[in-house]
Amino acid sequence: MAQRLTPDFPVPAHVAVIMDGNGRWAGRSGLLRARGHEEGAAAVRDVTEAAAEWGIRHLTLYAFSAENWQRPAAEIGVLMKLLRRYLREERRTLLEHGVRLRALGRLADLPADVRELLAESEQATAGGERCTLRLGLSYGGRQEICDAVVRIAEDVAAGRLSPGELTPGMIAARLYDPGMPDPDLIIRTGGEVRLSNFLLWQSSYAEMHFTPVLWPDFRRGHLLEALQDYHRRVRRFGRVPESDPAVR
């Protein structure tokens, strides 16, 4: 674990996190899965505060996937209860740290009271200028692209767009949050090495950092390690850097 808890290098503008390992954390401790989800909330708080303090302008957390609706009803109920608690109890912390809250996903699938709390929190924190925290809720990358394609098909059917005019930018403009910049760094906790349907369109050139640390144990020190790993990368975006001997 790195001892220094403040980056001494430029940080990426957008960090996205696949928060994995709550259930395994609980299982290893002989606890119910719900306890793992509860402990994961502390990690959300610490990482969000660190992002705001360190100048990370955008933080996106994969909180509840579109596929998570297939989980047992009791577990879904616990997750929605924790989400309600988070939206009520963390609003002051978000305001204190200048964090703006937004949500990504098929939000209509969420319970009505959760949608109401989300709208209230988004409105209350709209003035946050240090960091934008996005929660992926009922979110899936394939679903997001499919929904964008539906909007494009509607525009074509209405004569507002010709298929031959379609560009990647037009697709990006129809994603859930067109103003969201592509992530520079995607972190996945819990030891798994896959994207799990997260930001599939936006992650084309994102750097990946995989850690065995389970999400309830993840803290700003682990975030710093991920940022240090990112800082060592050379991002080419398909190009060859001028410093490469091959181009001399």
Image: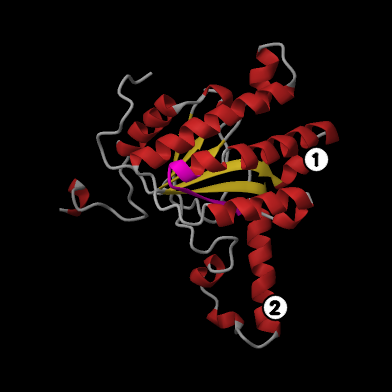
Dot 1 or dot 2, earlier in sequence: 1
User: SS at mark 2?
Assistant: helix
Q: Which disc, if any, is residue 70? A: 1
> Can you say whether 73 is above or below 110 in the image?
above
**Closer-to-camera residue (86/68):** 86
Please indicate, yes or no, whether residue 189 appears anywhere in the rendered image. no
Q: Position of residue 245 (x, y in %)?
A: 18, 47
Q: Is residue 158 magenta?
A: no
Q: Residue at x 56, y 28 (%)?
A: 42
Q: Tell me the crowding category of disc 1: few under 14, some 14 to 19, or many 20 or more residues within 10 angstroms, Cα based.
A: few
Horizontal relation, residue 146 to residue 165: left or right: right
Q: Residue at x 66, y 11 (%)?
A: 29
- Compared with 6, 31 (above or below) is above
The answer to whether residue 23 is left or right of residue 43 is right
Q: Position of residue 7 (x, y in %)?
A: 30, 33
Range covered by the magenta-colored residues = 95-103
Between 248 and 101, the residue placed more toward the observer is: 101
The N terminus: image quadrant = top left
Q: CA distance from mark 1 to mark 2?
A: 30 Å
Identify the amino acid type marked 1: Gln
Asked whether 98 falls inside the magenta stretch, the response is yes
| Position of residue 89 measured from the top left corner of the image (x, y, whole percent) | 61, 37
| Mark number displayed over residue 211 | none
State the residue in front, 75 or 234. Answer: 75
Which numbered disc covers residue 154?
Answer: 2
Extreme residue toward the top, this view: 30
Q: Quadrant of residue 159?
A: bottom right
